[in-house]
Image (spheres, rainbow, N blue to C red):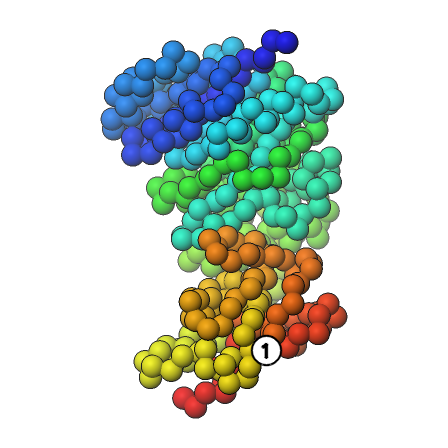
Amino acid sequence: MNLPFVSVVLPTYNRGSSILQAVQSVVDQSYANFELIIVDDASSDNTEELILGIKDPRIIYIKNKGNLGANASRNVGIQVSKGTYIAFQDSDDVWCKDKLERQVTILQNSDEKVGVVYTGFHRYKNNSITYIPDKSIPMEDKTNNLYQFLMYKNIVSTQTMLVKKQCFEVAGVFDPKMPRLQDWELCIRLSKYYTFCLIDEPLVHVYFSKDSISSNNKAYIEAKCMILKKYYENYDKKELQRMIKDLILFSSENNMFEVGFNILNQYFDNTLISRDLMVECYEVMDGKRKKFKKNYEIMNKIMKLKYNQVSLTTYFIDHNINNVAIYGMGELGNILYHELHHSEVHIRYGIDNMLKSYKDLEIITVNDELPMVDAIIVSAIFDFENIKDKLNKKVDYKIISLEAILNSYEM
């Protein structure tokens, strides 16, 4: 049986520091029947020299005469591609060795309605590792119901996709007008016509770069507005207002409220950005300010203990607590993890819906089975009683708040 020929499209711009690793992860694939089309978007660094120095006949190097942007560069690659299937790679990310082989096998043996096979990925950002798509999302939403799901949230990243080339003839290619979220917008169109299959494993490692387009918050707000406007008919008014509210809060949290609000006003009128909606936003922002203040007070207590050379582990030893789980692996949960790490107290697992990755700690969701421990320590400051009630319905372990532990010490 003839193996399908795959075209891998990799756009790049001034990524001389990372592109060799990205290219090498493609060249080293266990599936070898491919071409790698590198579209250099008029880089001014040593990218061209580095690529031309790689002696692999499967590599095709194209350099744009001017800077067209990542979307247009991907479209250049699609246009010149010879493959039956098309995959995408980014210039600062890494594929696992069997990624392409496993995707090709599935696509080759799938129903003709299947147009895309995508994989899970690990995102590395700010010293944390997050697995996407979240394991708590039902598989049906990640495959057969993906079109509806994508109206609210994206879980597919460009470099995880293997697509039948013919799909682009029906759904279209990347929209060069999108300042960000181009993979999301494309996947909405693709999922309207074709079924997606998912390999629910991290076969791609995605690295956050401070100077990449994915770090541009203004572009994010504009791109999200473009998607909401483009697929307006898929939302009712309440759903649309909820998503607009999320963008207002995002703008506020990133110290760009005025910028974000001005962008929103370009796309939506005051029937959607209503006075009531703004009052809701203010109440949420005020709640977050109070939470931030409370978190600061908790962290201040922890710092006082450290200053006085008092260890948090004494509480657990005094109360005969040897094995614990931490509920909430955010900032306070992470501090607690490091305080107890390598102490006499054994942290058996963490509970967090984001499923953040730790080298030596399993993270599960609250919906999973919770293995036996002496106590679950809740790092979340707000809503402790509701969290406690929810956990008590599942287990009969002690449920203790981090705040209560800190209050037990004389400051």
Secondary structure beneath dot 1 equals: strand
Is residue 190 or residue 225 the one in the foreground?
Answer: 190
Q: Is residue 94 above or below residue 291?
A: above
Is residue 396 or residue 252 the one in the foreground?
Answer: 396
Identity of the residue drawn at 73% across and 40% down: 140
Q: Amino acid at mark 1?
A: Ile
Q: Is residue 319 above or below residue 256?
A: below
Identity of the residue drawn at 53% across and 17% down: 6
Is residue 195 or residue 355 the one in the foreground?
Answer: 355
Counting labels gives: 1
Identity of the residue drawn at 63% across and 58% down: 365
Q: Position of residue 5 (x, y in %)?
A: 54, 13
Asked where in the image residue 327 lies, by quadrant, the reply is bottom right
> Circle 1 is placed at which residue position?
400
Neighbours of disc 1 within 10 Å: few (<14), some (14-19), many (20+): some
For the question of whether residue 409 can be seen, the reply is: yes
Q: Position of residue 115 (x, y in %)?
A: 66, 24
For the question of whether residue 276 can be seen, the reply is: no
Q: Is residue 373 above or below residue 203?
A: below
Identity of the residue drawn at 39% across and 35% down: 92
Q: Quadrant of the C terminus?
A: bottom left
Asked where in the image residue 184 lies, by quadrant, the reply is top right
Q: Position of residue 362 (x, y in %)?
A: 55, 56
Q: Is residue 162 above or below residue 295?
A: above
Q: Quadrant of the N terminus?
A: top right
Q: Position of residue 319 (x, y in %)?
A: 55, 84
